[in-house]
Image (cartoon, rainbow, N blue to C red):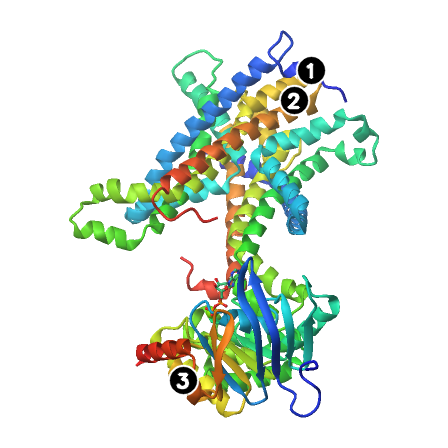
């Protein structure tokens, strides 16, 4: 097989091959292959500690894997054997790739010293270098979309968790990303606030956005995704259409995991 | 430049004994001032937390004033002002001069007052850091105010206050050098004298700085130890 | 009370006020730059970090008075200093006092700034990384602004502390407010009135500075305004 992401038609938005990641002598990812084509919504599920966050963070290289190849938003980073640090060209590619992906964190990570609107236009203006007036207009439309138009000039610290996460989603969208990555976007929220965030993400799925979502909300995952991936101890144990992975998994471990989580949520 | 290290020794030409004694005076002034500060700081914090309006205002004024005036000026006020008062009182009583007051006393009182203002803030912060729940728990088992202060508030507050008190103590040591302006022969004064009479100012001021560094380092270790001790049984210290 | 004497004293003291302000402003400016350099040294690696630690240890562990004397009386001991181009400066009490104030302020400010950097939420920096900000943009737009806001309350105390510390310049003959007060007392022996007069001058200044810094704090960190007691 040649390199990932052959140019032309059918080029995936994100494609990973042979991703390995170690922390000390703990092997967290043991060779992961995964592809997301435009319009795909992939649900990444698995027990706590199975490596979901690490895998997701490897895509924009918030964690640098020890081996593997990452192709995302038109940029390719192939790690050479034994490579410790990224070289200059790779770093530049990472920067370009990051501006074309949106990342939503479990703990929101809004910038505390910027208002809601300023959080949204920070990267478009100062990283992508786009005209401010245009960015503000777009940001206002995005706030409208996540239902927070009236919070335009509020400070992050004055918002509820659900509102902060919706701002964080709008901030990710402001980059006009090719794909969105969600790391347990509702895990830090009080139960009554989960719904408002899921609603926004569901809306994005209906728009046909490309997304990879790490989540423990099984019912939600089954509804929105067109592909589910079950991770176990750093390997993909099961992947396929949601009906298969959630309702009739082949692997025993996936079956046990899914059934226990569905029971818990009902 | 060659230095005759024997100048710091305990031989016939050595300044060792007087420097050691001066270091002792530095510690003595500092301890006196610090203890005065503990008393004033506790009273002041108490006034700010539980006092009625005029008491709170008085405590507030005390801290604002002492934190707004240079330490040196406070010492001047107590020393020279004190002398003026004593001379005036002596004159009224028909006594003959010259009149003087103790640099130790004036210095210790001045620094104690300054430190009291700082310590009041430390104690107040420590009080507010006590979880409300632990006060409620004391109230529901029927503890009265004083018992609650002694058994629940003071131990918890003291434990959180230790790092802040450590900083206050370090300030007191450094402020004690200012008492040299009263002529009290503590470390600063003694090295100034030695610097003048040997005409080796760099050598002796550096030696003086080292003496202060030794005192502040040792006290730092002591307070660190006290902090660890006070947190025994609780979550490990987080840096 | 002798109001004529008090007002006369007050105006005499006021003549020293510009020098007091001059020393405070310049020592804070110099100390601030040096503090930033110390933090950069700390970030540069093991050696830089040890140097910064040692510097802070020296200047925070000994009294400012001895640092002033060490520079003013001590440096002249060295022929190398006396022959250097710096001697015209280091001979002057003004430059010696200013140098000591700067070096001293740098140690305290460096620690305050370090605390500010440490208090920047990890997630805020990560979010900046994730949207492709370069190292420099991150420092300029996220890390430094957040760190400075975090450090501002502690730094306000340092500003007040430095303003008061300028009084020590009087010990090397400088005629700022405290120096003039001291000289007037020697001339008139009316210590209480004169020193109280000086105290009022300092007190009013520090209160005004505190007020101004509070305003700056709420302007820079308005989201904290509601939480401030
Ligand atoms: N920065 C890190 N340093 C060391 N170990 C880590 C780090 N990040 C994650 N790990 C470890 O890697 C494993 C997988 O973590 P993670 O990817 O967060 O799992 P998940 O998101 O599936 O719960 C865990 O055992 C975790 O302790
Ligand atoms: Mg995780």
Label 3 chain ID: A
Q: Nearer the viewer, residue C107 or C209?
A: C107
Q: Which residue is mark 2?
A: B204
Q: Which residue is mark 1?
A: B198
Asked whether the beta carbons under mark 2 and mark 1 sit within 8 Å of each other, the answer is yes
B162 versus A90 height, above or below? above
How many neighbours does mark 2 have within 10 angstroms: few (below 14), some (14-19), or many (20 or more)?
many
Report the Cα–Cα distance between label 2 and label 1: 9 Å
Q: Nearer the viewer, residue B59 or B152?
A: B152
Quarter placement of the N terminus of chain B:
top right
In the rendered image, residues at marks 1 and 3 fall on the same chain: no
Locate residue B129 relative to residue C104 in the image: left or right. left
Report the Cα–Cα distance between label 3 and label 2: 80 Å
Asked whether the beta carbons under mark 1 and mark 3 sit within 8 Å of each other, the answer is no
Q: Residue at x 57, y 32 (%)?
A: C63
Instruction: Report which quarter residue A70 is drawn in.
Output: bottom right
Q: Secondary structure at mark 3?
A: helix
Q: Secondary structure at mark 1?
A: helix
Label 1 chain ID: B
C13 versus A220 height, above or below? above
The circle on residue A246 is 3
Q: Residue at x 81, y 29 (%)?
A: C80
**Does the numbered disc 3 mark a residue whose Cβ is under 8 Å from ligand 1?**
no
């Amino acid at each position: 097989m040649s390199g990932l992401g052959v140019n032309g038609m059918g080029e995936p938005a994100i494609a990973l091959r042979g991703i390995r990641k170690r922390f000390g002598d703990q092997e967290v990812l043991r060779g992961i292959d995964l592809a997301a084509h435009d319009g795909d919504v992939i649900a990444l599920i698995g027990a706590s500690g199975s490596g979901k966050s690490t895998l997701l963070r490897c895509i924009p290289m918030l964690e640098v894997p020890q081996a593997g190849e990452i192709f995302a938003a038109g940029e390719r980073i192939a790690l050479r054997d034994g490579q410790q640090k990224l070289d200059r060209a790779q770093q530049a590619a990472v920067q370009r790739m990051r501006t074309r992906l949106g990342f939503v964190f479990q703990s929101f990570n809004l910038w505390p010293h910027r208002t809601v609107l300023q959080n949204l236009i920070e990267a478009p203006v100062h990283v992508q270098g786009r005209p401010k007036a245009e960015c503000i207009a777009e940001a206002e439309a995005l706030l409208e979309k996540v239902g927070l138009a009236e919070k335009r000039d509020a400070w992050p610290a004055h918002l509820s968790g659900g509102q902060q996460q919706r701002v964080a989603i709008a901030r990710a969208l402001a980059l006009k990303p090719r794909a969105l990555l969600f790391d347990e976007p509702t895990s830090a929220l009080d139960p009554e606030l989960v719904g408002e965030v899921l609603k926004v993400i569901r809306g994005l799925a209906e728009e046909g956005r490309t997304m990879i979502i790490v989540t423990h909300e099984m019912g939600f995952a089954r509804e929105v995704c067109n592909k589910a991936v079950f991770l176990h101890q750093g390997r993909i144990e099961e992947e396929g259409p949601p009906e298969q992975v959630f309702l009739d998994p082949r692997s025993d471990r996936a079956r046990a995991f899914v059934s226990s989580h569905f029971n818990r949520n009902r | 430049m060659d230095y005759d290290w024997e100048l710091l020794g305990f031989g016939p030409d050595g300044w060792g004994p007087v420097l050691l004694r001066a270091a002792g005076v530095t510690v003595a002034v500092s301890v006196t001032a610090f203890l005065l500060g503990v008393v004033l700081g506790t009273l002041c914090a108490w006034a700010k937390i539980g006092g009625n309006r005029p008491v709170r205002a008085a405590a507030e004024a005390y801290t604002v004033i002492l934190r707004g005036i240079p330490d040196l000026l406070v010492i001047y006020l107590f020393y020279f002002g004190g002398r003026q008062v004593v001379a005036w009182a002596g004159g009224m009583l028909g006594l003959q001069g010259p009149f003087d007051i103790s640099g130790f006393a004036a210095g210790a009182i001045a620094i104690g007052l300054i430190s009291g203002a700082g310590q009041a803030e430390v104690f107040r912060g420590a009080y507010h850091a006590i979880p409300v729940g632990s006060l409620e728990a004391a109230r529901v088992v029927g503890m009265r105010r004083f018992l609650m202060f002694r058994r629940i508030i003071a131990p918890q507050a003291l434990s959180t206050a230790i790092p802040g008190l450590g900083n206050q103590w370090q300030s007191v040591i450094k402020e004690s050098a200012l008492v040299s302006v009263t002529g009290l022969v503590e470390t600063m004064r003694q090295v100034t004298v030695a610097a003048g009479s040997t005409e080796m100012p760099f050598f002796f001021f550096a030696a003086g700085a080292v003496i202060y560094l030794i005192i502040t380092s040792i006290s730092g270790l002591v307070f660190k130890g006290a902090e660890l001790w006070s947190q025994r049984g609780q979550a490990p210290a987080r840096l | 009370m002798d109001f004529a004497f008090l007002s006369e004293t007050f105006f005499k003291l006021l003549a020293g006020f510009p020098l007091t302000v001059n020393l405070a402003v310049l020592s804070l400016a110099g100390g601030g730059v040096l503090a930033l350099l110390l933090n950069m040294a700390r970030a540069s690696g093991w050696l830089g970090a040890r140097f910064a630690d040692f510097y802070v240890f020296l200047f925070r562990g000994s009294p400012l008075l001895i640092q002033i004397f060490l520079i003013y009386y001590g440096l002249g001991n060295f022929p190398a200093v006396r022959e250097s181009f710096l001697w015209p400066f280091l001979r002057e009490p003004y430059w010696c006092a200013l140098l000591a104030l700067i070096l001293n302020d740098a140690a305290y400010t460096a620690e305050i700034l370090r605390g500010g950097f440490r208090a920047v939420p990890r997630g805020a920096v990560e979010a900046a990384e994730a949207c492709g900000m370069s190292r420099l943009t991150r420092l300029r737009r996220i890390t430094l602004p957040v760190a400075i806001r975090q450090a501002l309350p502690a730094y306000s105390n340092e500003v007040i502390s430095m303003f008061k510390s300028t009084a020590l310049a009087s010990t090397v003959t400088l005629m700022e407010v405290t120096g003039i007060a001291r000289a007037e007392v020697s001339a008139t022996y009316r210590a209480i009135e004169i020193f109280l007069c000086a105290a009022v001058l300092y007190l009013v200044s520090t209160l005004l500075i505190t007020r101004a810094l509070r305003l700056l704090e709420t302007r820079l960190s308005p989201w904290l305004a509601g939480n401030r007691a």
